[in-house]
Image: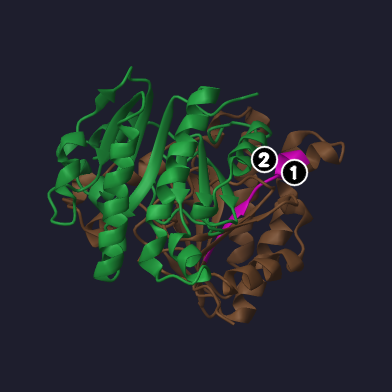
Chain colours: A brown, B green
Amino acid sequence: MRIPAHIGIIPDGNRRWAVSNGMSKEKGYATGLEPGLAVFKLCEQIGVKEITYYGFTTDNNKRPMTQRQAFTDACVNAVKLLSGENASLLVVGNNESKMFPEELSSYTTRRAFGKGGIKVNFLVNYGWEWDLGHLAAAGTGAYRKNIITGMKSNAISRIDLIIRWGGRRRLSGFLPVQSIYADFYVVDEYWPDFKPEHFYQALDWYDKQDITLGG
Amino acid sequence: MRIPAHIGIIPDGNRRWAVSNGMSKEKGYATGLEPGLAVFKLCEQIGVKEITYYGFTTDNNKRPMTQRQAFTDACVNAVKLLSGENASLLVVGNNESKMFPEELSSYTTRRAFGKGGIKVNFLVNYGWEWDLGHLAAAGTGAYRKNIITGMKSNAISRIDLIIRWGGRRRLSGFLPVQSIYADFYVVDEYWPDFKPEHFYQALDWYDKQDITLGG
């Protein structure tokens, strides 16, 4: 079986899950922690080299304060949880903004935890315009390498497979350049209803795709 | 019914269609002309404001010469065909390269045909790195407007709905910035097997999506 080197995870549907379970929207985020760890362990087992989790975005900050607080806490706790594993962790996002949780400042350069291992990237207060907006500074040109070097997310490699939970079929600003050739698999269930089968189904589907990189 | 203002069309599967019909791969492209015109007319009927067709990319140029010739001819003929309609036509792509067909040079600034009308963009010898690689020149910053102004495709607006024929669930370099919030609908049939139902199904599905722009 062809295993993707790099998987992107869009853990969507937390609020809809909360509402459909009779809770207020912000209660949906904490339930996303366990699935996040489960996906990490599945990736570890099958030999994935890199995972990127979509935490929250600068767009998401337009939401009500109780929700902002809840998704920020969930991200902080998720990163802490993953730092208990064998992983090489990096948080990528605009940490010059007040919306960036201070507790994650020490993760903005990559650090190995445990025995190191899978690269795990966590997007926190990430914005595509923040990511692309400083290409000028790097002295770019129409070459892939230059573009990638000039991006704020330059430590994150090309993504092979994106799995999005919660049924939406869109990228919503997730790493536009690294996602250019990614195969995109959508799980209809909400992220808090994560089951290992979702992951295996995505891998089975990915195994049947041809990889052309546009060629 | 909520009608998308801007639809992106990825007309994939021409080569697979040809092979599955006992022809050599390059024979698949010419059959894409009629569907292209059909989609245009459907968009016109329902009041879409802008359409972008994915013609061919700098990545595609790696293919054998007979195929290159065939997809280039198909693009030239498609643009000519559309210039017989009421449309405001623009070809976007690297026209400083030998791979850009000379016959389309006069379309690289937008021109109205007939009574004008829908904006129609046609990506010809387009490359995402060509598009993003000159952001520096525009003096950018981390603001959406600056990024879009600095892109080569700056005359193309944000896309609401992307429809891809041929079953692949990926963007393959299609306008990474304009596609950031686009809803992505995949038709399993090959592009030469286009049926109006595919288009209507995509619209029905789009009508059920919520539009958050990441918020």
Q: Earlier in the sequence, mark 1 or mark 2?
A: 1
The one nearer the camera, A180 or A7, is A180
A130 vs A186, left or right, is left
For the point 41% across and 57% down, which residue is it?
A178
Vertical arrangement, residue A206 with respect to residue A97, above or below: below
Q: Position of residue A22 (x, y in %)?
A: 87, 36
Q: Residues within 10 Å of mark 2 (few under 14, many from 20)?
A: some
Percent x, y of residue B24:
40, 71
Tag on residue A28? 1
Q: Are marks 1 and 2 in contact (CB under 8 Å)?
A: yes
A14 drawn magenta: yes
Q: Is residue A183 above or below residue A103?
A: below
The amino acid type found where label 1 is placed reads: Gly
**Residue located 63% across and 68% down the image:** A205
Which mark, by number, is residue A70?
A: 2
- What element does badge 1 sit on? helix
Disc 1 to disc 2, how far (Cα)? 8 Å
Hey, which quadrant is residue A201 in on the image? bottom right
Relative to residue A147, is residue A172 drawn left or right? right
Write down the region rendered in magenta.
A7-16
Amino acid type of the residue tagged 2 in the rendering: Ala
Q: Which residue is most to the front?
A: B22
